[in-house]
Amino acid sequence: MPTVTWGVIQGRKEKLVSRVIVCDYLKSIGIVPDELEELELPSTVEVMRERVEFLQKIGLTIDDINEYPLMLGCSVRKNIIPVLGYLEKIGIPRARMGEFVKNYPQCLHASVVVELAPVVKFLRGLDVERQDMGYVLMKYPELLGFKLEGTMSTSVAYLVSIGVNPRDIGPMVTQYPYILGMRVGTMIKPLVDYLVSLGLPKKILSRMFEKRAYILGYDVEETVKPNVNCLLSFGIRKEALASIIAQYPQILGLPLKAKLSSQQYFFNLKLKIDPDGFARVIESMPQIVSLKQNVIMKPVEFLRGRGVAADDVAKMVVKCPQLVALQVGLMKNSYYYFKSEMGRPLKELVEFPEYFTYSLESRIKPRYQRLKSKGIRCSLAWFLNCSDQRFEERLQGSYIEAESSGPSFYMGGKLQLPGNDNIVSEEEDESDDEVLYKRTVSL
C-alpha cells in the first residue's frame, strides 16, 4: 500500500506525469535517472527533494548518488532513518555514516530486524567485541548482506577444522573481516593445501593465521606460488621454505622479486656476500628482505670500525644474520665488555658472532662472572649458547664437554628492529611440538 511519503493515490496517467516531473527535477540537480525506470518513485518533487537533501546531509554527494541511484527509492522515515539509527547504535560513527553508505548503499534497503541484526548477532557469537563492531563493518560493510548459513559459516568451520582456536576467530575477524567472505573451496583450502605441500604442518599454519589473518587473503596462483618460485630462483633450498614462511609469513605477499634483487645486489656490493651466502642469510632470517639498507649498514660499519676485516664481517653476517638488525648502542656495550673485562681476541667474535644477540646484563655478565670465580676458561658458545639449567650443569661438571653442533639459528632474545617498536619475532606461547618443529626446520 502507498504510504504518506508517496503522496496521493494516482491513476496511471497522473503517475506518468508525476514521474516525468520528478525525473526532470533529478536531472536539474545532476542526477541521471536512467536506472530508476523500474523503480517506483514518489509522486511529488517535495518527497524526492527530502530524500536527496537527507542523503546530502549525511555526507553523500550528487556523484555518490549517481553511483547507486537506487538509494532514491528508499523512504526517509521507513528505510533510511531506522537503518542509520541502528548502524550508529552498533558503533558506526555518525561523522562517517556518509562514507559507510557510499561504500555499501545497499544497506539502506535492508530490514534491521530481518537482515542487519542477525548478522551483528552472528559476529558477536564469533567473539567480535562490541566496541570493535563498528570498525569491522567499516572495513567490510558487505558483511551486512551475507547469509548466515552460507560463506560466513563454512569459512569459520573450515578454519576451526585445521586447528585454529575457536576463541581466536573473533580477533581474526576483527583484524581481517574479509575471511568471512572467502569461499573455502576456491580460496582458503587451496592456500592451506599448497602451504602444507611445502612442509608446513596445519598446526603451524593455524598459529600463523591466528596472528596474521590477512595471509588468508594472498592469492595462491597470482602471489604465493610466484613468490615461492622466486625464493627458489635466488638459491633458497626447498627444504628451507617451511622455516622461512614460519618465521616471516608476510614474505608470501611481498613484491618479492624486486626486493630480493635489490638486497642481493646490496649485500654483494657493500657486504661482500656472494649470492650463495645471501641465500643462506635469507634462510636464517627472511625479515632481511624488508630491512632498510641504512639499518643494515650500521652494525656492519661498527664491526669494521673495530678492526674486523670486511671478509670476516661477511662471514659473521652469513653465520648470524641477526647482527644486521641489532642496535649499535647495545653492540658497543657488549663489545667493550668483551675487550675490557674478558680480554679475549677478536677472532672469538668472528667465530661466534651470536655473542652480540645475547643480553649483556642478564646473560653475558652474570655467566662470565661465575666462570671467572671458578677459574674456567672456555669458548663463548660453551657458556652462552645453552639454557640456565644446562649452564649450571656445566659448571658443576668436572670437565668441559665437547660442544655439540646445534641449530644454525641462534637467538639471544626477541629481535627488535632499531627505531621500530614492532617486534619481528614475536614471543608466543608454544607447545613442545611447535618448539621442536621450529628447531628441526632451522637445522
Image (cartoon, rainbow, N blue to C red):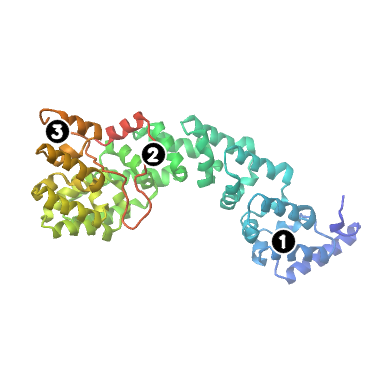
In the foreground, 366 or 148: 366
Q: Which element carries disc 1, helix, strand or loop?
A: helix
Cβ atoms at labels 1 and 2 below 8 Å apart: no
- Evaluate whether residue 164 shows in this view: yes
Q: Earlier in the sequence, mark 3 or mark 2?
A: 3
Q: Earlier in the sequence, mark 3 or mark 1?
A: 1
In the foreground, 65 or 59: 59
Residue 163 x %, y %: 46, 31
Say which amino acid is labelled 3: Glu
Residue at left offset 18%, top offset 59%: 301
Say which amino acid is labelled 1: Asp
Residue 284 x %, y %: 26, 43
Q: Would you call the spot at circle 3 few (<14 residues within 10 Å), some (14-19), or many (20 or more)?
A: few
Left or right of 142: which side holds 273? left
In the foreground, 336 or 192: 336
* Cα distance in 3D space between marks 3 and 1: 81 Å
Q: Which element carries disc 3, helix, strand or loop?
A: loop
Say which amino acid is labelled 2: Glu
In front: mark 1 or mark 2?
A: 2
Residue 17 x %, y %: 86, 64
Cβ atoms at labels 3 and 1 below 8 Å apart: no
Residue 403 x %, y %: 14, 33
Residue where numbered disc 3 is placed: 403
- The circle on residue 34 is 1
State the image quarter where residue 429 is shown. Answer: top left
Q: Which element carries disc 2, helix, strand or loop?
A: loop
Residue where numbered disc 2 is placed: 428
